[in-house]
Amino acid sequence: MSVRRVVPNIQSEAAQESREFYGLLGFEEVMNHGWIMTLASPSGPAAQISVMTSDKTAPVAPDMSVDEEWGVRRFFVRDPSGRVVNALGHR
């Protein structure tokens, strides 16, 4: 198993304000599905943060996403501190 990236997810109803705030820190919008938006550093695109309202396909809102190479699957797990990790893969 090879981890490709880890992205913190911030649950927020203030997407526009978050885009502006993180823009001041050098992040740019690279994906926006309406309910989730991902911002990345132009000089280091693996440095990312996602802002989400909620995931209607999930029982909980994850605190972070771990991206792996093993196909389109996902599962949720709580870490020892109670944070929800969304482990996912893309084709």
Image (tube, rainbow, N blue to C red):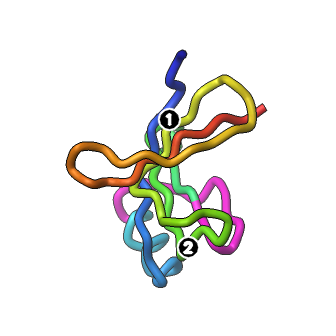
| Nearer to the camera, 78 or 16 | 78
What kind of residue is marked 2? Ser
Q: What element carries label 2?
A: loop
As drawn, 24 above or below 45: below
As drawn, 71 above or below 88: above
Judging by the rendered image, the residue that carries numbered circle 2 is 54
Where does residue 87 sit, x and y in percent of width and height?
53, 40
As drawn, 5 above or below 39: above
Task: Residue at 43%, 71% (x, y): give it.
Answer: 11
| Nearer to the camera, 10 or 42 | 10
Quadrant placement of the N terminus: top right
Where does residue 3 sit, x and y in percent of width and height?
50, 24
Q: Distance between the residues labelled 2 and 1?
A: 23 Å
Judging by the rendered image, the residue that carries numbered circle 1 is 46
Q: Seen in the image, is 71 located left or right of residue 6?
A: right
The disc, 2 or 1, on the residue closer to the chain's N-terminal end is 1
Task: Residue at 45%, 53% (x, y): give it.
Answer: 49
Where does residue 74 sit, x and y in percent of width and height?
62, 42
Q: How crowded is mark 2: few (under 14 residues within 10 Å), some or many (20 or more)?
A: some
Q: Seen in the image, is 28 located left or right of residue 89?
A: left
Q: Does the magenta stretch include residue 33?
A: yes
**Residue, far left:** 81
Quadrant placement of the C terminus: top right
Task: Residue at 53%, 76% (x, y): give it.
Answer: 53
Q: Does the magenta stretch include residue 47?
A: no
* Segment colored magenta: 24-37
Q: Seen in the image, is 20 located left or right of residue 29?
A: left
* Quarter of image, res 89: top right
